Amino acid sequence: MGRAGRGRTVGALTVAGVLAGTALTGCGNGGDAAGHAQASSATGSSGAREQGTRAVRSAYDRTAEEDTARITLRVRTTAGGRTVAANGQGAVDLGDGDSVMTVTAQGQRIEQRVVDQVLYQRVPRGQAPDGRPWIRIDLRKAAAGQGAGAGSVSDPARSAAYAKAISDKDVTRKGTATIDGVETTHYRVAVDVADLPDGAALRRQVGPTLPMEVWLDEQGRIRRQQTDMTLRAAPSPSDRASAGASPSARRVTVRTVVDFTDFGTEVDAEAPPARQVADMTGKATEQGGTRG
């Protein structure tokens, strides 16, 4: 697989890392059933903020109770004056994060599956390594190889920690919005990075808080989640080699938007036959680390 092909693989790995496990089980603190409805009509009083916090913290559990959902994913990454967008549509198991999706990135449509935290992608014609139509990337090993820090935010399997990292001062009700025909209440959340997994490393990269927004329906379920991350990434080899290029870290911004619809939809995620799969975990880890 050529350099461009590897770049697409790593780009899609970012999408898969976000999706891989949109596993939401056990994330909230229970909350009360009326918390969301009360917060929707309340003012900016301390009581309303408490209700809003309970609504957001319990939203992960309420969403996970639906077991599965259709999902639309949009990831927009900007670095060095260049913006790369990747979009995905498919279905996800909210309990274990298994999924089936079609991802569009850099002009190509890619079929992918995530099974037991392993990403499988059907390689575009002419780019198959060893003539095998599928590649395999172990997302756990790839994330470990790229080091702790901002990468952990890209894995909503850790969304469990979001609910535990917010308090009343962190949640602001922004109003209402209609998403896919569903009335929702919009909350802005400032997640305390220190309370997230790999919090110390995250703080060095993204600062003390992680901005996040959620839109909850009348049942208190997440219909949309948006995460905005600005981090400092190590300069790439091409940056360092460029004449006059600064060796300092680059500023990278990542916006991830996940929409949930059609709760209860069927998810049939199975790994391709082993003989059709080439393992690219090592290359993806190396390329991801190079790109910072």
Image (cartoon, rainbow, N blue to C red):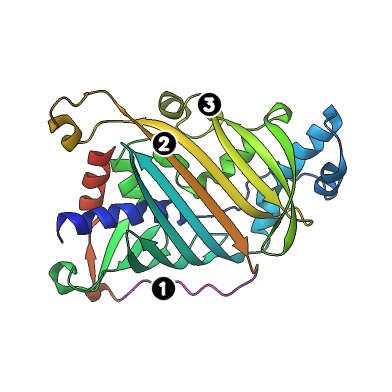
Give whichever of discs 1 and 3 has the lower sequence position: 3
Instruction: Residue at 21%, 24% (x, y): give it.
Output: 247
Question: What residue is shown at x 49% (from left), y 75% (from top)?
Answer: 268
Q: In this rendering, would 41 be left or right of 284?
A: right
**156 over 136 or under it: above or below:** above
Please provide the residue range marked out in magenta: 264-272
For label 3, the SS is helix
Q: Amino acid at mark 2?
A: Ala
- Pick the residue in front: 232 or 133: 232
* 199 displayed left or right of 261: left
Residue located 30% across and 58% down the image: 137
> Can you tell which mark lies on residue 194?
3
| Whole-number angstrom distance, CA of label 1 to CA of label 3 | 36 Å
Q: Residue at x 25, y 51 (%)?
A: 284
Give the label, 2 or 3, closer to the camera.
2
Q: Which residue is labeled 2 in the image?
A: 150
Q: Is residue 37 above or below residue 270?
A: above
The front one of 2 and 242 is 242
Cα separation, mark 1 vs mark 2, equals 29 Å
Q: Quickly name the residue at label 1.
A: 270
Q: Nearer the viewer, residue 165 or 257?
A: 257
